[in-house]
Image (cartoon, grey):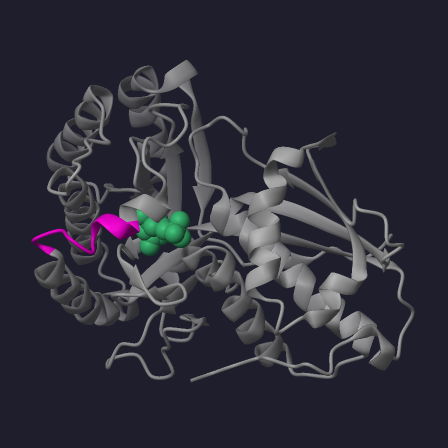
Amino acid sequence: MLSYNNPSLVLSNSTEPLTGTVSWKCPSNIAIVKYWGKHGMQLPKNASVSFTLEKAFTNTEIKYSPKDNSENSLRFYFEGEEKPSFLPKIHHFIDRIKNTFPFLRELDLEIHSSNSFPHSAGIASSASSMGALALCFCSLEKEIFGKEETPDAFLKKASYIARLGSGSACRSIFPYASVWGKHEDVEGSDDYFGIAFEENLHEVFKSFRDDILIISKSEKEVSSTLGHQLMDTNIFAKRRFQQASDNLSLLLPILEKGDVEEFGEIAEAEALSLHALMMTSNPSFILMTPNTLKAISRIRRFRKEQKLPVYFTLDAGPNIHLLYPEEIQDRVGEFKKEQLRSLCEGGQILDDRVGLGPKKNEEK
Ligand code: PMV
């Protein structure tokens, strides 16, 4: 079992100045084979694979200095405004990683965070925000203790830490695509961290489009914590974990050869399975709205009539991710304008695409 526990990382052992700033930009990701159900300390019941997004991201900056023993050693600002309501979540995260980064408890931390997407757009931001925080914490270690490591080792550790903030966040650390969870067909895959899935990814997917149709801006009806928990008693759980594993086995060669139609079939089946699981849980949840269903049927009709490879996936909510290759973006643009925009709250669609992964913001 991988462990990053390191009791020697206390300020008395630091080699560098104890005051400074670290800052990272981390994108969100969209799962194609979904993670739904966990055990132990944020470990997945099945392996998943996701695309890293480009335009939906969180920017996080941490200003650090030695603790002055005032009570207020952690402050959090979201889009310029102090938000004490976010603190319990961050304290909980820091508590989980206290044996990896014991020095965090010796520091005053001022965290400034902002999202590229509207706050109330019903988009889960935990992957990008926890990813950005994890990257900042790893950079803090590097800056305070002058740690030398390869870029790959840095990202592996950041992914491990991000997982402890929010499971799916561990996949946001890598460019293009990532696999998280041990799977016999993916060498190096692991339950404790995500890995890059880049080398074997066909070019068509590296510029794939993912437009987010904001069907509803409302807050999520079910937290993912509760959603995962419901899988402990869902009567289809065992079959589902097998299905996810089989779908990943099927998807890997498809991602490699670039077959967009076969890709789309699996992506849609996975999204609908996730929602079926929510419907068959106890308590049960229906997270799609009438407009979600209308959009799905229009996407399927457009695909059939126009013979164009346009597919959808869903998160655990009503919003739709429209997936298609870059080369048909003009045709899809017209379709969105004519048939999908009216189904979105405030006509909002966030045009996104597969992206290059996180980026450290260097000081100007
Ligand atoms: O990372 P969490 O605990 O918010 O769970 C995310 C679950 C889904 O988004 C529904 C699926 C996934 O694999 O990202």
Q: Residue at x 88, y 80 (%)?
A: 15
Q: Quadrant of residue 99?
A: bottom right
Residue 58: where, in percent of width, then height? Answer: 60, 45
Is residue 206 or residue 308 the one in the foreground?
206
In the rendered image, residue 302, in percent from the top left (x then y), is placed at 17, 31
Question: Is residue 252 or residue 345 the one in the foreground?
Answer: 345
* Residue drawn at (19%, 31%) of the image: 286
Q: Which residue is located at x 21 percent, y 41 percent?
A: 308
**Residue at image x 10%, y 42%?**
280
In the figure, 224 relative to 333: above or below? Answer: below
Q: Is residue 85 magenta?
A: no
Give the left or right position of residue 272, taking residue 95 as reference: left
Classified by dominant secondary structure, the portion drawn in magenta counts as loop
On screen, 313 above or below 167? Answer: above
Residue 358 in sight from this viewpoint: no
Is residue 118 in sight in this rendering? yes
Magenta stretch encompasses residue 235: yes
Quadrant location of the N terminus? bottom left
Is residue 54 left or right of 180 when viewed as pictured? right
Q: Position of residue 345 (x, y in %)?
A: 38, 17
| Residue 135, horizontal then vertical, whole percent | 63, 62
Viewer-nearest residue: 212 or 18: 18
Quadrant for residue 212, please give it: top left
Left or right, residue 108 beside residue 98: right
Q: Which residues are magenta?
A: 228-236
